[in-house]
Image (tube, helix red, strand yellow):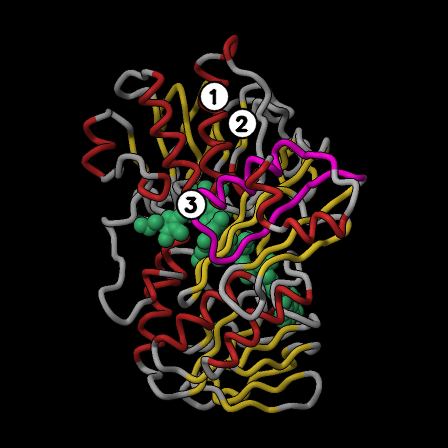
Amino acid sequence: MGRAITYVILGGGVAAGYAALEFTKRGISHGELCIISEEPVVPYERPALSKGFLLPEAPSRLPSFHTCVGANEERLTPKWYKEHGIELVLGTRVKSADVRRKTLLTATGETISYKILIIATGARALQLEEFGVAGSDAENVCYLRDLADATRLVDVMKSCTGGNAVVIGGGYIGMECAASLVINKINVTMVFPEAHCMARLFTPKIASYYEDYYKSKGVKFIKGTALSSFDIDDSGKVTAVTLRDGNRLPADMVVVGIGIRPNTGLFEGQLTLEKGGIKVNGWMQSSNSSVYAVGDVAAFPVKLFGETRRLEHVDSARKSARHAVTAIMEPAKTSEFDYLPFFYSRVFTLSWQFYGDSVGEVVHYGDFSGSTFGAYWVSKGQLVGSFLEGGTKEEYEAIAKATKLKPDVEDLAELERQGLGFALAV
Ligand code: FAD
Ligand code: NAD
Ligand code: ISD
């Protein structure tokens, strides 16, 4: 059993949706493009799963958040794919790939051959077992990567109103889920090994603002330790969590967010890997010229830093996917990807954005006892990163523009004095 398709996108997440939209904008014929996805639904905006999807009142549900609404573009429903002649092979895992023969073999036994392949397989959530702790399969232990996880998390939350949740991990999933649990009237204790939350990005001063805010909502923090084991009852439910520091916390549910691993497995030994991802050039092309990689799974040159990076954020998935399609369809007109890294989060009524790179010396500005504050990162005498909480659209645009321009910064004290005004004046 087999079929031959010109363009195949492997993976049906955020990057796949934006790539499909770009293919149609650049002009493809019916039957020329196929998306193969393990998920049973057409691409959607994954960020919604830890935000609107978890709300107790009027939660977001599909089809409202199919791509590409997150970038204020068209919402691509199953009907849209049909009207554009895009073949969907959903609920189907690709179990092997042969880049020399240009074929993919699905778990249903079909061989799909391609002229051009775009790998958009994203990443999987790391499991506790990979850190030596058993119990991920317990009924009330939740991970959050896809729609099935989010649906399960909602069900578990509904059965725990007024109860206790332990959140393992102080990164994006931990912080966003903890806020959602509180909104669902569940008591939350967060446990993570670092000295403060969001250790990959936040400075201690920024982290302490968010931790204080969470504490004001009743969240407890246990820092500098990790999970050691679960107590599991006869019905297969976790009842308590024991930590390495000896603490034992009663738990009606557990949410785990301890990082991800890019889904590169199908291509190991076939394509060059770097930074845990598939190494691509500035046109998102891998070490095999017929194979492109985009989104979380791609390690691409970030021109601004002169370094290869693998980013795990939605803006990068959207833009890298569109760039790959442009490079495929109009190679002569496409220049090297020139990307400004952009991360954001929204929790409770708070909202922040970050642009650039969090390296070098940090200068904080604004009112950390109020609602608008931020930080700049300065490396080798240049502004390389900007963070802002509670900004307006114009202020976020200003920090983005300033970071992209990498202006010289001679005097850190003067930068601190100017604060947001520095970016607004660039
Ligand atoms: P994904 O969107 O993960 O898509 C990968 C797809 O490939 C999936 O459909 C998967 O099933 C499929 N797949 C994988 N292997 C196979 C296979 N062998 N065969 C068939 N199909 C396969 N980023 C932000 O910047 N801001 C946010 O607020 C934010 N919120 C997030 C909230 C949550 C809950 C999560 C999980 C992530 C969030 N992110 C956020 C990160 C962002 O969603 C990812 O960076 C983005 O989804 C990456 O897109 P992608 O297409 O590369 O991968
Ligand atoms: P993360 O990398 O943001 O955070 C992982 C956290 O796990 C670390 O901060 C650490 O506290 C903790 N940790 C690591 N090892 C641990 C251990 N053994 N025991 C206990 N804690 C441990 O990853 P995540 O929060 O799991 O998020 C998963 C992915 O989803 C990431 O790619 C993230 O970028 C993405 N995401 C992004 C957003 C956003 O950008 N707003 C929101 C949700 C998810
Ligand atoms: O970027 C995003 C984000 O944070 C969401 O919640 O895309 C989604 C959509 O806005 C949901 O409609």
Q: Are marks 2 and 1 in contact (CB under 8 Å)?
A: yes
Q: Are marks 1 and 3 in contact (CB under 8 Å)?
A: no
Distance from Cα at disc 2 to Cα at disc 1: 8 Å
Under mark 1, the amino acid is Ile
Identify the residue at image location x=71%, y=54%.
363
Secondary structure category for the residue under label 3? helix
Residue receiving disc 1 = 116
Q: Does residue 133 appear left or right of residue 370 in this picture?
A: right
Whether residue 107 is visible: no
Q: Give the camera-side residue of 64 and 241.
A: 64
What is the span of residues highlighted in magenta in the rendered image? 381-408
Q: Is residue 154 above or below residue 286?
A: below
Answer few, some or many: residues within 10 Å of disc 2's Cα (few below 14, many 20 plus, some between 14 and 19): many
Residue 393 has which mark?
3
Whichever of callouts 3 and 2 sits on the residue coming sooner in the sequence is 2
Q: What x and y, as percent, mark residue 240?
A: 52, 89
In screen coordinates, is 236 left or right of 285? left
Which label lies toward us, 1 or 3?
3
Relative horizontal placement of residue 53, taking residue 210 as reference (left or right): left
Front-most of residues 276 and 163: 163
Q: Residue furthest top?
A: 332
Amino acid residing under circle 2 = Tyr
Amino acid type, label 3:
Lys
